[in-house]
Image: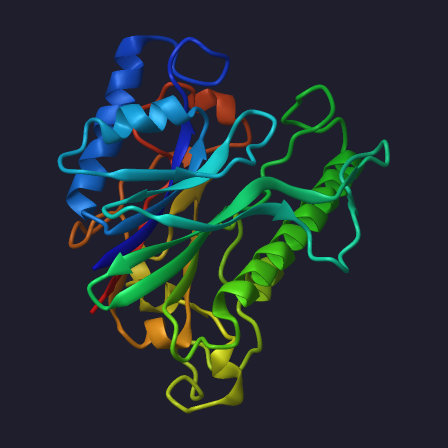
Amino acid sequence: MLLGTWNLENLYRPGGPFGPKDKAAYETKLAALAAVITELDPVLLGVQEVGEPEALQDLTGMLSGEWHIALSAHPDGRGIRVGFLSRTAPQVVADTNAFPAKLRPVQSDDSGAEESATGRGLLAVEVTTATGPLTVAVAHLKSKLLTYPGNRFFPHDEGERARYGAYALYRRAAEAASLRALADELLAGEGKTRDVAVLGDMNDEVQAATTQILLGPPGSEIGTSGYDKPDRGDAVRLWDVAPLIPADQRYSRINSGRRELIDHILTSHHLVHRVTAAGTGLPGDGTLRLPSVGPDPAERRGAPGSDHAPVWVRVE
């Protein structure tokens, strides 16, 4: 089976402030997205940047066969939320935006305002597969693309840039800790026997501190000498499948000309040892064809497809 994650980039119906300006551009975007999903043929696909639930329904209407939708009830201020497309009916087991009990609110701007919850909900579902139940959580953590007062995308000076970069990092770290807390609940200390995955747009790369928070205890990452050795941490660890992606495809977005892997799939011990392949884009498609994006996301309003590539794993 193929399990994947994909940021659909501002999936709104036309006519609003964030989606395509006309029906033709909207239909072109949907067709591009549907073609990729059809080729991927996932059992379960975590999705991000669903701006309107109706737009996701329009997208699934362009796919063949029966598809089920699960969406978080915790969107951000623009209506952006995470969700799943599934071949079988998913059971929602968690939909939360709560910080862990001991984690205090974090500063979010120069006024001293604080955030005490994740910007977008963390959604977890369970589906039935040929090999048993599979539990998956999807997330979309705080972006590194900064927004300044007055909805500016460019700072007045470098001091403002540094401060707002710190605020974004505080939020992303708190959200990563919240996602890790949800992973703990899903694993329940039984990762050696449970198929659990955590996936989504983590908005930072493999070695970033926020991404590393999600792993749990270090020591047996893929490619290290401890990977194939039993360890007492195996029951609670998650493994990022990034090292299994071919090196020339190990990116899911191009930011100002720089390739970066900011979309991730992390799996439990029981699941990671059944992964037979991992990749970005379409299996066997070679070089990714992605646009390079800059600091102003409005520049791509109405563009076809997505500025992210899907990330996927194939499991036996």
What residue is drawn where x is 39% and y is 72%? 194
Q: In which quarter of the image is the C terminus?
A: bottom left
Q: Can residue 35 be seen in this view?
A: yes
Its colouring scheme is rainbow
Pinpoint residue 51: horizontal percent, then vertical percent: 46, 26
Q: Note whether 27 is above or below 252 in the view shown.
A: above
- Would you say 263 lies left or right of 26 here? right
What residue is drawn where x is 42% and y is 41%? 83
- Would you say 160 lies left or right of 92 here? right
* Residue 10 lies in quadrant: top left
* Residue 257 lies in quadrant: top left
* Residue 289 lies in quadrant: top left
Pinpoint residue 44: horizontal percent, then vertical percent: 29, 50
Question: Front-most of 138 and 242?
Answer: 138
Q: Note whether 44 is above or below 266 in the view shown.
A: above
Q: Quadrant of the N terminus?
A: bottom left
Pinpoint residue 82: horizontal percent, then vertical percent: 46, 40
What residue is drawn where x is 29% and y is 55%? 3
Question: Front-most of 116 and 8?
Answer: 116
- Mark count: 0
Q: Is residue 207 visible?
A: no
